[in-house]
């Protein structure tokens, strides 16, 4: 099936990518693995991570793609596949996935939104940084260890509180 996606070369995008099992804690259990896979994908398919947070069963990210490049689907495919390869099999696999020899770790689809202006960007950065609070994981966003908020605090772009 062909999905309609906004693909603007050099665009800035907000993503939500989720595990198939929404009660899983795999992403934070394997946060180092996820970080390493993203680093490797970035070496071969560069992009800038503007903001990111990893929660137990999903993540949010804002990426800025290089000028002339709109291929975020390949990047997400490589990240999801690279992450999955290092996870021992044992997840529930539905028959439709088994027929295609797919793992059952990630949801097939993900949400993407083309950032249209500075206000839209700031709204989504704030959403990402405060997501651990929204889900009740932490009382203060800056105490969640799997968030890019720490870079913003180090750079002086945000206060810790």
Image (tube, rainbow, N blue to C red):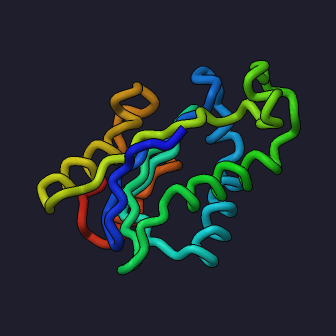
Q: Quadrant of residue 42?
A: bottom right
Instruction: Return the x and y of residue 137 as percentages of the image width and height.
Output: 46, 30
Instruction: Return the x and y of residue 64 as percentages of the image width and height.
Output: 37, 68
Q: Considering only vertical position in the picture, is 107 above or below 151?
A: above
Q: Considering only vertical position in the picture, is 56 above or below 145?
A: above
Identify the residue at image location x=52%, y=76%: 46
Number of marks: 0
Instruction: Return the x and y of residue 91 as percentages of the image width and height.
Output: 79, 26
73 relative to 135 in the view: left or right: right
Identify the residue at image location x=65%, y=49%: 80
Identify the residue at image location x=50%, y=43%: 2
- Residue extending farthest front: 1
Q: Is residue 148 visible?
A: yes
Instruction: Return the x and y of residue 117 as percentages of the image width and height.
Output: 14, 60
120 relative to 89 in the view: left or right: left
106 relative to 120 in the view: left or right: right
Q: Quadrant of residue 65?
A: bottom left
> Where's the N terminus, which quadrant?
top right
Q: Is residue 56 visible?
A: no
Residues 106 and 134: in front is: 106
């Amino acid at each position: 099936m062909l999905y309609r996606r906004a693909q603007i070369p050099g665009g800035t995008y907000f993503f939500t990518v989720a595990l198939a099992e929404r009660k899983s804690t795999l992403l934070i259990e394997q946060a180092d693995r996820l970080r390493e896979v993203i680093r490797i994908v970035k070496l071969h398919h560069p992009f800038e991570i503007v903001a990111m947070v990893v929660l137990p069963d999903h993540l949010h990210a804002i990426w800025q793609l290089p000028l002339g490049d709109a291929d975020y689907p390949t990047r997400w495919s490589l990240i999801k596949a690279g992450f999955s390869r290092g996870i021992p099999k044992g997840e529930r696999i539905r028959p439709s996935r088994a027929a295609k020899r797919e793992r059952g770790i990630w949801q097939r689809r993900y949400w993407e939104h083309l950032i249209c202006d500075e206000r839209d960007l700031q709204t989504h950065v704030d959403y990402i940084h405060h997501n651990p609070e929204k889900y009740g994981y932490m009382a203060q966003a800056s105490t969640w260890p799997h968030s890019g908020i720490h870079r913003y605090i180090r750079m002086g772009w945000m206060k810790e509180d």
